Image (cartoon, rainbow, N blue to C red):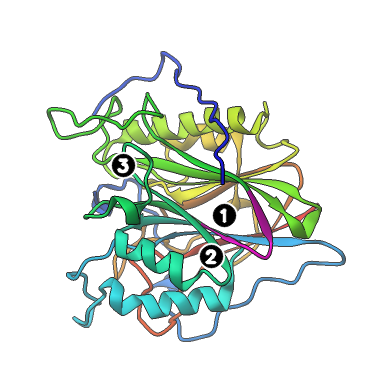
Amino acid sequence: MNFRKLFLVTLLPAALVLMSCGPKDVVNPVTPPSTHEGGGSDEPPTPPTPPGGDAVSMTVCTFNIRYANTSDKYPDGSSAAWKDRAAAVKKFFDTVKPDLVGLQEIRPEQSKWFAEQLSAEYGYYDVSRDSGSGASVTAHGGSHEGVGILYRKDRFDLVLKDFFWLDATPRELPVQNSDNTYGAWKSACRRITVYAELKDKKNGNAIIWFFPTHYDHKSTEARKNSADFMVTQMKALCKVDDLKQAGVVIIHLGDLNTTYDNSQLKSLNDNMFYARNTAGGTDKGTNTFNGFGDSNSIIDHIYYGGKAVKPVKYWVDKTNYGVPFLSDHYPVLFQWEYQ
């Protein structure tokens, strides 16, 4: 696949003030209803709602898979390492079959696993956040991690794929500062967005722009800058002035490490629709981060734009697929129909 040259807007408004990797730093946690407390449910998941009439539906998902290590434990003391969760993650994909997925915290062994274990149904693309060349997580190796995309090969044709860093110079590897932060926005870690333009073969080759990401977990200013910059970038790349009324579908999702109502995400809330608020479902107050135990944080989000999108359902998948938790985050899903 040849990459199309990326048009990047590298200057943020002068009003942005620059200042100074774990969920404990997330602000404004939201308490979920008591009916959603605890670990995964043993009940089978409710399948996506069949579209009405001749409508064509699509399900997108954001999933922070928790980076591979050997120290994670479930509340009962058993191992929550990636090798002990991988089969359950595979069962999730085999059961729910989301059309587009954004993945966060991918380490090399996980990158290889996704590329191989899901290859029959999904195309896969990821980038290491610490690779100056934009190499895949697998190719970069070591303990580096990145962000990735899964797309159903029977549904989509890939037009292009690329990435940029969440920093003032998005095409340059952010340098490490003297205080061990990174780049002009002083992120605790280097942060990237991967993206793809796809044609939806189920709906006349309609164009879908997909932007998975992972915002910084410590710097509030980095998160605000990231949200502001993402709006600017999506408008430039998709060649639209109004994301909500775009003639193409635009999806921006990921672990944003803050809550929807925080001012850091104001530009996203002003310029895009928020799936948790617009779609049906009973999970509007359900936590998305669980920490392999209890948590009250809703920090994984799905935003969308495009006048063709009719929201149908939003849900947080807490199903027990063979382990108490698939990750320290739940998969978060959004189903919509073309209108």
Marks 1,2: beta carbons within 8 A: yes
Label 3 environment density (alpha carbons within 10 Å; few <14, some 14–19, many ≥20): some
Q: Position of residue 23 (x, y in %)?
A: 28, 53
Image quadrant in which you'd find residue 51:
bottom right
Residue that badge 2 annotates: 283
* Span of residues in magenta: 150-158
Pick whichever, 109 or 247, lies toward us. Answer: 109
Q: Amino acid at mark 3?
A: Ser
Could you tell me if residue 7 is visible in this image? Answer: yes
Q: Residue furthest right?
A: 53
Residue 33 in sight here: no
Residue at which label 3 appears: 131
Q: Residue at x 25, y 73 (%)?
A: 81
Q: Does residue 219 appear to the left or right of 103 in the view shown?
A: left
Please rate how many residues cluster around mark 1, counting C-alpha atoms within 10 Å: few if below 14, some from 14 to 19, many from 20. Answer: many
Determine whether the residue tagged by mark 3 lies in a helix, strand or loop.
loop
Secondary structure, mark 2, is loop
Residue for badge 1: 276
Between disc 3 and disc 2, the foreground one is 3
| Image spot of residue 277 (x, y percent) | 59, 52
**Outermost residue toward the top in this view:** 14
* Magenta span includes 124: no
